[in-house]
Amino acid sequence: MAVSKLRQVRLEPFAMAAQELRSHGLAVLPLDDKEPRIQFKNWSAPPGKEAIEKFIPKFGDSNIGIICHLSGVTVVDIDDPSLIEAMLERFGDTPLRTATPRGGVHLWYQHNGEHNRDLRTSDEIDVDIKGHNGIIVVPPSVRQNGQHEGKPYQFVTGSWDDLPRLPKILPGALNRVTPTPLGAVKQGWRNTSLFKALLRQAHHCDNETDLIDVAKTINDDFPDPLPEAEVIKTAKSAWDIHARGENWSGKEARFQITRSAYNALSPDSNALNLFHCLQFSHGARSEPFAVSPKAMRKANVIPGWGVDRYTNARNKLESMGAIKCIYRGGRKPHDPSMFTFDPSFPLRVGKLNPI
């Protein structure tokens, strides 16, 4: 009997648990592994008992997802377990934590108007914020394919009974940047992580030599240290920005735009809006950056924008010469096109300290 019930839970997560989750106030929907099987964007309230009864015959074997804001929750989705403690310190403790099949953790909080956000863009860490229209897979769902096929989503601490007493995310947490733990720095992110760390440390250094010494110390702690020449080059680049008074690290980001650049972009408000966002995120450095419409839509970088709107605005910026594509992606999954700001475009690039 126990074996039969276990098999039923594994094969029919939605049928077994959807009504229970509804009774806890969660807005449930059926998932094909992690993707919604029904349209939900126009929902203004969680589906009721009768609606779920209609879903079960068709989607009973589906995984269960919840729509975060309609469920009254915001979830910090951590893919890298080494980041859990740092995220708890940043966002606050919570009695409810669930685990993913690949070893990640979901930290649950009371929804307070948060939007979806991908911290890979701002912090270079494997963390997503699931807020408005965010979807999270929940227990007793089971990974249905891939490397972790057959592994369940499960509770780490707490239960659905803890939902009424979830805390809100700590004030200001979304505006902070969490330095990546050195053991979690991926090879492709070492330069960026070192550069951002040096911008933070530059406020406490008297000169370039001091910052180079700090850079060497940080690099020694990387699992795979950078060559010394690269470390010195990165430190000098960070100090140059600091010495020019353009070190925005730890402060609100700004950028300057010339009148001619504004006049060129202003007829297309979408292009101007995207240009602002790209400047805030990437304007302080010359390194290439990704402009992925799908990823930006998923992260809700500009609230309400769809993939086509991002694509059209990006293409407009490229055609006008505001950004330049140096690598055309799309050859495989997770292969974004890479861009730089075109120096011939009439603007002054750089993030500045607030006045």
Image (cartoon, rainbow, N blue to C red):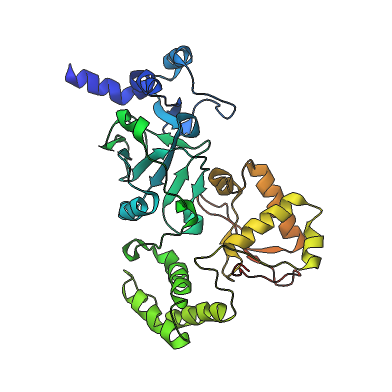
**261 and 12: which one is in front?**
261
The C terminus - image quarter = bottom right
* Corner quadrant of residue 102: top left
The N terminus - image quarter = top left
**236 and 226: which one is in front?**
236
**115 and 15: which one is in front?**
115
Q: Is residue 93 visible?
A: yes
**32 and 93: which one is in front?**
93
The vertical placement of 150 against 128, above or below, is above
The vertical placement of 324 against 10, above or below, is below
> Residue at image x 69%, y 45%?
309
331 relative to 264 in the view: left or right: left
* Corner quadrant of residue 194: bottom left
> Residue at image x 71%, y 48%?
312
> Residue at image x 40%, y 45%?
77
Percent from the top left, x then y, of residue 329? 58, 55
